[in-house]
Image: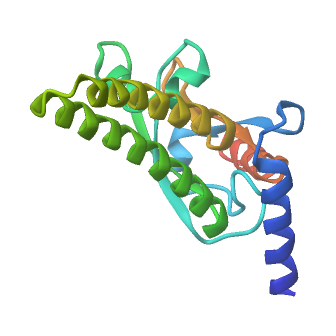
Amino acid sequence: MYEKEARNEQMYLFFAVVRIDETCWVRSVLRVSDQEAGRFPDVCMLSGVPTDRAVRLAATRWRGPAWMLGLPAFGLLVGLLPGHRRCRLALPVTAAVWGIWQRRNIAATSAMVFGLVLIGAGIIGSASAVALLGAFIVPVGYVYRTRAHRNFWVTCRLGDAGSTITVEPTHAAFDAQARRLFVSSI
């Protein structure tokens, strides 16, 4: 039984999550008080498969476009601004989903670091072509990281009152559990 569920999850991840189709995903709302009490759904936020694993994230109060929260360090910097609060939260994630996200994140970070190394080597060695190549690779890695975040991972926004967290996009099974948890805590 477990092998069948794992195989179904892998097929789902391969076909459905490689590029998120906005029409089949939902926006879920969690209460900050539930998060502080350690209560959250027990299915993966992206695959809907039951899991006992979770990842720690931060929700930031932000009214701008959601894709900007995928920019590396953007949520951290916005959270430091006056009037923009941050809140830590835990969201359930399966090992397969986490592995895919980590590979994409590491690929983008590696490209950015490689570009910075080329810039440094070009400046030290007086090789402007190498520095220019590095100057091209860094923003490409940055854009890839932002796009990978937007197309595969979730953004977490803290509500204006600071009592709710909006997580998007999420799987319908995660949303159903989040909705039951939200209603039961009112």
Which quarter shows the C terminus?
top right
Colour style of the rendered protein structure: rainbow
Q: Quadrant of residue 66?
A: top right
Which quarter shows the N terminus?
bottom right
88 left or right, relative to 174: left
Residue 185 vs residue 31, the one in the foreground: 31
Q: In this rendering, does residue 133 appear at all? A: yes
> Residue at position x 83%, y 31% from top?
22
Q: Is residue 157 above or below residue 111?
A: above
> Residue at position x 29%, y 31% from top?
130
Q: Picture coordinates of residue 71 (x, y %)?
A: 47, 28
> Residue at position x 58%, y 38% from top?
149
**Which residue lies most toward the left here?**
124
Residue 162 vs residue 143, the one in the foreground: 143
Q: Quadrant of residue 83?
A: top left
Q: In this rendering, does residue 37 appear at all? A: no
> Residue at position x 40%, y 25% from top?
74
Residue 178 vs residue 48, the one in the foreground: 48
Residue 76 vs residue 109, the one in the foreground: 109
